[in-house]
Image (cartoon, rainbow, N blue to C red):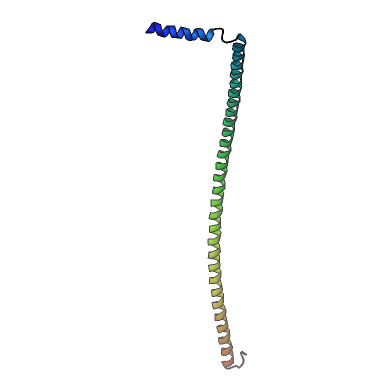
Amino acid sequence: VREAERAKEMEGKGSGASGSQDPQDITRMISEAQMQAQEARQQEARATSQLEEARSRQHTLFEELEGLKASLTERTEEVEGLRAALEQVQSDKTEMELGLEDQRAKERHTLKMLTQAQTELANLRRSSPGGHGAK
């Protein structure tokens, strides 16, 4: 059985190498194969170059992203600081407004007391034995 298989293989090889194919055809096939191999190498080189460019661009974009993240974090901290300052200013303003209202109430009370004192003094001067406040 093995000898029969070998014989068939030899026949296949013999018919392939027989004169049915012209040496020019074989040369042309070799040239085409070499050109295809050359084209494949060029495509591989272009693909490798594009891959390296993509990796480089990816690295650059990653660095830019990290920079943007850091900047965003910094800006967020600034905004939080400004928000806290604004809240403090609003709190101070409220306290000042309350203090001002308090001060106005005191002034109104003082003015009322002063008016009452002036009225009482005027009444005392009129009712005093010397007359219109003369001493």
- 30 or 93, which is in the foreground? 30
Q: Residue furthest left?
A: 1
Q: Residue at x 58, y 21 (%)?
A: 40
Q: Residue furthest front?
A: 20
Instruction: Give the quarter of the image for residue 66.
Output: top right
Q: Position of residue 50 (x, y in %)?
A: 60, 28
Total label count? 0
Residue 21 versus residue 68 in the image, above or below: above
Q: Position of residue 110 (x, y in %)?
A: 55, 77
Q: Residue at x 56, y 39 (%)?
A: 65
Residue 30 versus residue 79 in the image, above or below: above
Q: Residue at x 43, y 6 (%)?
A: 7
Q: Position of residue 121 (x, y in %)?
A: 57, 86
- State the quadrant of the C terminus: bottom right
Residue 86 versus residue 41 in the image, above or below: below
Residue 41 versus residue 65 in the image, above or below: above
Q: Position of residue 100 (x, y in %)?
A: 56, 69
- 59 or 120, which is in the foreground? 59
Instruction: Give the quarter of the image for residue 112.
Output: bottom right
